[in-house]
Image (cartoon, coloured by chain):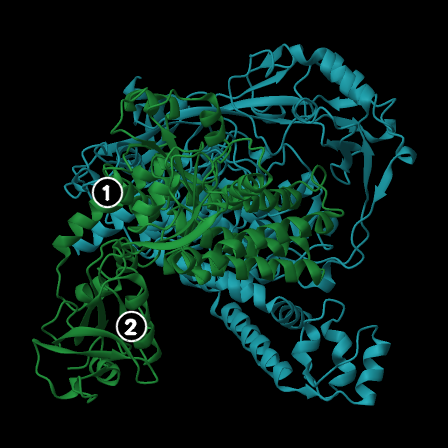
Chain colours: A cyan, B green
Amino acid sequence: MDDKKYFDVADIDVAVVGAGHAGCEAALACARLGLETVIFTVSVDSIALMPCNPNIGGSSKGHLVRELDALGGEMGKNIDKTFIQSKMLGTSKGPAVHSLRAQADKREYSSAMRKVLESQEHLTIKQAEVCSLLWEDVNNDTCVNSDTVSRKIVTGVVTGTGATYHAKAVVLCTGVYLNARCLTGESITYTGPNGLMAATHLSDSLREMGIELRRFKTGTPARMDGKSIDFSKMVEQPGDERIVPFSFSTDPDSIQKEQVSCWLTYTNEETHQVIRENIHRSPIYAGIIEGVGPRYCPSIEDKVVKFPDRERHQVFLEPEGLYTDEMYVDGMSSSLPEEVQLRMYRTVPGLEHCRIVRNAYAIEYDCISARQLYPSLEFKAVKGLFAGGQFNGSSGYEEAAAQGFVAGVNAAMEILGKDPLILTRDESYIGVLIDDLVTKDNKEPYRMMTSRAEYRLLLRQDNADLRLRKYGYRIGLVSREILDATEEMDRQIHEEMDRLRSISLGANAKVQDLLEQLGTTSLKTAATLADLLCRPELHYDDLAVFDPDRPTLSNRVKEQVEIEIKYEGYIARQKKQVEQFRKMENRKIPADLDFDEVPSLRIEARSKLKEYHPISIGQASRISGVTPADVSVLLIYLERRS
Amino acid sequence: MKGLFEDTIAAIATAMSTGGISIIRISGPDSISIADRILVTKSGKHFVGGMASHTVHYGFVTDQDGEIIDEVLTSIFFAPKSYTGETVVEISCHGGIVVSRRILERVLTCGARLAEPGEFSKRAFLNGRIDLSQAEAVMDLITSESDAAAKASVHQLTGLLSRRIGEIREKILYETAHLEAAMDDPEHYDLTGYADAFLPLLNGLLSDIKQMMDSYSAGKLLREGISTVILGQPNTGKSSLLNLLLGQERAIVSDISGTTRDTLEETLSLGDVTLHLIDTAGLRDADDPVEQIGVKRALSAAAEAQLILYVIDSSLPLSDEDVKRISEYPNAFRVVILNKNDLQEAFVYEDAKKIFSDIPVISFSSKTGDGLLQLQELIRDSFYQGAIRDDGNLVITRARHMEALSDAYHSLELVKDAVLAGMPEDLYTVDLMNAYRSLGLIIGEEIEDDLADKIFSEFCMGK
């Protein structure tokens, strides 16, 4: 390129590339830590855009949002401002599976986040496509492993117009925009989501730096004109009567409001017939799409193929916002041709006369295997270059936001000379998310799921602040005041648990009578209030009749006390599992360890270990292709070395 | 100097498969006082207390009633100049499982704890008596173990245990996966009625594990001997084989077919291994009603046997009947004995090996005793390698395995409690995964957290 085109604009601390859910969190974290930050977006109108589903949270994703909030992220606060329906899911199951989900007003969500960005000190919004990165080679004499490419250091970004920003760190949050193309049957457009401009230059620059790119795909269903839908044929899905906020900082009383409903209907044999007859016209099945799609967020075509015996699949009609009649058809994402889509949707009860406002489409984009990253989300090969969000091979707004936050925080920590924020699997879903991304060979967009968190009983959405506020405080995004309040709540919880364990009830006539009134069995011998709370049918408030002198406690404290006592045995055993896990995590593998020097390793294990260079024995044990015997060999070697 | 460990451990330090002399090793602060309690001189005096380090003493081990268990030599090593670096007493007794076990039990009832596999070496390591360069060897050991695990079928013990444990783990994993799928995709994975269907499966798993645990506590094979049946066509020399093994004329031996009409039962020791022998009537369709009863008994005894010695007269052509009969007892460990190799053989050993492929064949003569030593070794080796087993059930011999099984059992019981208490299904997985992990420790599919424990559990018990 012609050097004359370039011109210096500014020396900044952090450049964030992309202003989606990851980029917003990354930029806010850096700016709030006092670092001069510029956030780049191809369109300022698409800040915090929700190009797919109109909701935040849901199973396990709700956990991510709450954790993010506890750490000082913005997503929870933003959805609390802009939701139009809220629901706690999984309440028929154990507390680990409860998960909050809120329908957003998409436009409000986007503009509320934009306002937060605009009013944030040290943060500049810039509409421009970042086309290349600036970097230098560094002679890194601490790097022993011969397989590691000599490390580079990132020094800035250059936009399409040649504007050069020198930066100490760059956070890549390019989402699904890199070399994006959208497919509706045979029709292909080279755009990002929703017809927005794709970013077509940065991929080459990344490859030049030695970063390996891969191709993933995802999809979205059609949006219907709400006026064309017959809701009388569907089942109404109202919000909860008592709304629980996402953010621990939001006063629940302040957000109780009128809600809109979602609607449930089902596909049927006729729908499946239309799909089967036209499956060859789906770009995936026709082989046009080379990217790999998410197994856990499948298109309706995938579902029909994967569950051939299913007579029907759920379809939810969800409002896109209060500003529009558009309805999102959750459960029926598709890349079939428009003409087939229309026929397909019209087989669904209530959609017989539907008019499609926006077609369903699949989108294909460049992303990376996050194995190129440290758990801090910094590139192993490029100092100062961080990455978060769908660019790392994940799917979903919440997964993106969580990673964007961690990437942004760690860019800041590096500049500030502080320890990185590395959350572990035993303390957060975010830890599970990032560990899975950087350790495992993910062959499809990674979606957070409850089942991925081994220690989910401890990682509940209800205790995210108790788990993580301390880290938020440590990195400087949570105030001392908030941390103190959290610690005070923790103290109250334990005090009350001890109190319930110490109050014993005799098996006398009065007690038995009250127990009968509560619909539970009588006592055989004396029992403590804690013993009674262990009974599934009894709740904290029920015990008030036995406990006239109980202290006045907040709902949150009462909830924690009840969960901690009711599931005490399970929680204790899960904590033991965590102890085991931590022993492995705490056995660190030195960064300069040369795996070629370790005797007796199998060839496959050696090459995998060299490729990933895990930071701990625990991480090594999760790499596929590394067996327990290999890990034992490594353990013994490390013991000897020390 | 105060040692690292406050408890005293003991184990049989010699391999169980060698006869002759066994050594019971006691290590820890109480070794001397324990040894002093159980050892007496010929005149019944306790003597160990006053003895110097690195001395050897003649004496007798007594049981709690003062009865003599065995005549022994006792070696005393004071800390730190001993194998483990702790005070060690070693009691050398006359070999044999029964005697050495009784002495060990006596030591344990006097306050020692049974040493875990490799625990003496672990203490030696932690007390600085062996250095980590010796871990090189261990590292290779572990690696070779994992290779062996990959070729599990080669090693029958590893193979069978891994398979059983693997099957149970797979079931646990399947259920866990189902529960988790239902958590993440409730639309497609419904848990309605799941608890009712899950309970019988859980009971099945519990009973499978219980069975394995019982094999440990009962030590059935060690106590009762390996039930052994000698089978073969009439007059092939079964009774002669029995007599040869017993070293005395016990069964009536004659050249007349059908001489042995009843089953004869005998117990004999092959070094440490006890055989519970059932000689049987010749296998043929006899007309004589008395003989028919004998044949029936023989067959029912064979169906239960753990070891079948199948005798074939090699001076006669091989009959299809023999081949068929042998194949009827796949659960027992079988040996084909080609008897009468002192006569003109009608077919050769090599042919028999081909025909019986995976069944060991021994060329034998009950007249000259040729092949007897080979047979005895084969039986003993097979027993120690676990190839001879109890009704196709595994025998758990390692304390480490037993502990893991018992942990897994406990975890599954907790799952059952949760099911019966009507707990939400997602809570089952906590204990299901604990059971899965405990079982995985047995077959090396899970990493043990303590490095030293891991290394030294690879050593044999007591080494």
Name the front one of labels 2 and 1: 1
The answer for which chain carries disc 1 is: B
The answer for which chain carries disc 2 is: B
Tell me where residue B416 appears, x and y as whole percent.
Answer: 64, 58
In the image, what residue occupies the spot 84% across and 23% down?
A: A354
Report the residue marked by disc 2: B103
In the orientation shown, which residue stands out farthest toward the right? A232
Residue flagged by tag 1: what amino acid is it? Answer: Leu
Callout 1 secondary element: helix
What is the quadrant of residue A518 in the picture?
bottom right
Residue flagged by tag 2: what amino acid is it? Answer: Ile
- Is B457 above or below relative to A56? below
Tell me where residue B10 appears, x and y as whole percent.
Answer: 27, 70
Going by the image, does B397 lie left or right of B424?
left
Going by the image, does B428 lie left or right of A163?
right
Pick the front one: B94 or B453 = B94
Pick the front one: A155 or A274 = A274
* Label 2 CA crowd tier, 10 Å (few <14, some 14–19, many 20+): many
Report the residue marked by disc 1: B373
Q: Look at the image and tell me in which quarter the C terminus of chain B lies.
A: bottom left
Q: Look at the image and tell me in which quarter the N terminus of chain B lies.
A: bottom left
Q: Give residue A526's mark.
A: none
Tell me where residue A145 appears, x and y as whole percent.
Answer: 19, 37
* Label 1 CA crowd tier, 10 Å (few <14, some 14–19, many 20+): few
Question: Distance from label 2 to label 1 (Cα)?
Answer: 30 Å
Tally of marks? 2
| Residue A558 is at least partly visible in this image | yes
Tell me where residue B362 appears, x and y as whole percent.
Answer: 30, 33
In the image, what residue occupies the spot 55% across and 33% down?
A: B286
Pick the front one: B280 or A210 = B280
* First reached walking from the N terminus: tag 2 or tag 1: 2
In the image, what residue occupies the spot 24% across and 56% down?
A: B15
